[in-house]
Image (cartoon, helix red, strand yellow):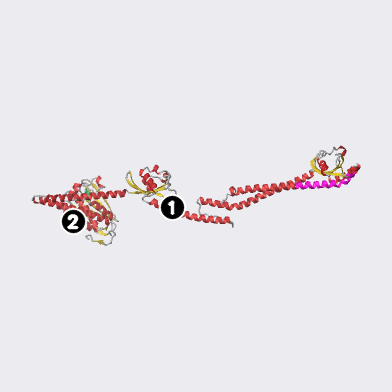
Amino acid sequence: MFIPMFTSRLFWKPFVYFSILITLVSLIGGYTTSKWQNDQLKEQLRARLRDTAISLEDVARKSLVSGDFAHVQDIIQKINAQTKVRITVVAEDGTVYADSDKDPQVMENHAGREEIIKASQNSEGDSERFSDTLQIGMVYYAFRIEHQGEILGYVRSALNTSAINDQIADIQLRIVKLVFIVVILGLLMTGIVISRMTRPVVQLIEEARELTSAQLGKTVEHGFDDEISELSRLLNELSSALADRMAQLEQNHHELLTVLEGMDEGVIAVDENERIRFANEAVCEMFDLDLQRDQGRPIWEVIRFQMVETVINQARKTSEHFRGEMELLGPPVRFLALDASSIPTQEKDASGIIIVVHDITEVRRLENMRRDFVANVSHELKTPLASIQAYAETLIDGALEDQDNNRNFLNRIVEQSERLHLLIQDLLSIARVESSTQTTEYSVVNVTEVVEKCIQYHQPRAKKKSISLEVNSPQGVAIYGEPEGIRQILDNLVDNAIKYTPENGTVSVDVQTQEKQVILKVNDSGIGISEEHLQRIFERFYRVDKARSRELGGTGLGLSIVKHLVNAFGGTIEVTSNPDQGTSFIVTLPRAEAGQPTVPTDS
Ligand code: ADP
């Protein structure tokens, strides 16, 4: 792992502080040492000058008392030759009597010299200054010579400062070098120590950053045996625990999304500002949404239906589940039920809302169908009943005695009773088919036998109308179903074919087999059905010509029973027709496996 140590503030901050500290301490140390050395040297110099001056006290006193300076001049020149110390004997008034370096005759009065003034007051004095006489920097020391309590003069010793200045410069240079080395070493050591101290912390920071940037589960070994290592271990544990949690959360999220996306119901969630947070595929399809485009947009900007606003507001106001219904103008027209409930949050007024949208179009359709069916049944039952009642009342009111009509009226009553009977039978059939689709156990049925029996049954009626009724079927064709149901299918289709075929026409039942299917075709050369009615003839009570159907004894339920039965057997029914030329009903049913035992068809 790349550790950006030298870009880390954690490193640079203490490093800069310590560097400044080390440099300051080194400079102060160097300066103090240098100054101390300087003072030491000067002190040594002063001691040497003092010793020299004091050693000449007696000689100088004698000369000053006697006024003979030749001897002292000789001595100081010798000392000067050996020690380079310049020695001057000065009278109390400042007159120079002897000097080791220069002719005293040409030397000016020294009463004003700093060291002489100091010595006149304190018995000794020193000064450091530029010598006007020798034109070089000098250190002076003056010692007062007294005789019997009277000041006679001064012995002054002096040394050129250039020698010690060179020495001082040399020492200073060494100290500067030393300070430089100390600073460099100090910085290096500081850098190493701080980097060692901060590296694990920087590593930890880096790790923590990786945790936040979702590289969870990653672990780092620091190789240190201290608290940082412990912290790192804890961080690693936290990282893997978080990684597990995240994986679990992601899986839950994924599962939830899969469930939500797989739902037929639409689900849409909005936040406290009514901005869309989530919408599943079903809701996107219903309202023509695109989640990528519309996520984050206010719902009222995308779905412009008042009911959506209403359910959101109501759910928010009451904090309870609220239901509303609305119509989506198609095509096709769809009816939707919206169930809105608030998503509980900490803040009471800032809750999000989740809306579940149910498509209730089918429920509505079924409700309407049921309502229509009940109305139709009532109407269909009322008509023959009203006729029976009317004929019976007419008979009671005197027609019973009317020999010409009474029999006719009774026949009508019987006719209408038969109609009622047929209607009730068909209604019972529908009820039976609808309730038995899931419970009836199917078996193998010999369809050839059923067809032949059906043809035999209808032959007399066909003959009456001079209709040729034929069957074309190979022997032993078997399908998987229920014998009574197959019989009903064929019965209804053949009955209709004879009913709607004029005299001298033809009706045929063709049975064909395919690998997995059996095709039953009921063809007639009858009145046919025009295009606009073809799609609706399987609806309950739908009749192309109501009066004609009634007259022929139809109930309008036959084809709807047929369709139900065919579907229950896992088959399909189609119709092709040309008005005035004829109609063909084509029923396709699953073929039974060869060799399976068949069920008797007259059961
Ligand atoms: P119905 O009892 O009136 O015959 P069905 O449900 O059997 O009722 O048929 C519905 C309608 O379909 C009939 O009223 C009739 O108009 C039409 N239809 C059915 N079969 C035929 C056919 N073979 N030829 C012409 N029209 C038919």
Of badges 1 and 2, nearer the viewer stands 1
171 in the magenta segment: no
User: In the image, residue 479 lies at what x, y percent?
Assistant: 27, 57
Q: Nearer the viewer, residue 126 or 465?
A: 126
Res 131 quadrant in image: top right
Q: Nearer the viewer, residue 402 or 61?
A: 61
The crowd level at tag 2 (other Cα within 10 Å; few <14, some 14-19, many 20+) is few
Q: CA distance from mark 1 to mark 2?
A: 65 Å
- Left or right: residue 216 versus residue 65 is left
Mark 1 = which residue? Answer: 253
- Residue 159 seen: no
Q: Are marks 1 and 2 in contact (CB under 8 Å)?
A: no
| Image point (45%, 53%), residue name | 250
Mark 2 = which residue? Answer: 457
Magenta stretch?
37-62
Say if 269 sits above or below 599 in the image.
above
SS type, badge 1: helix
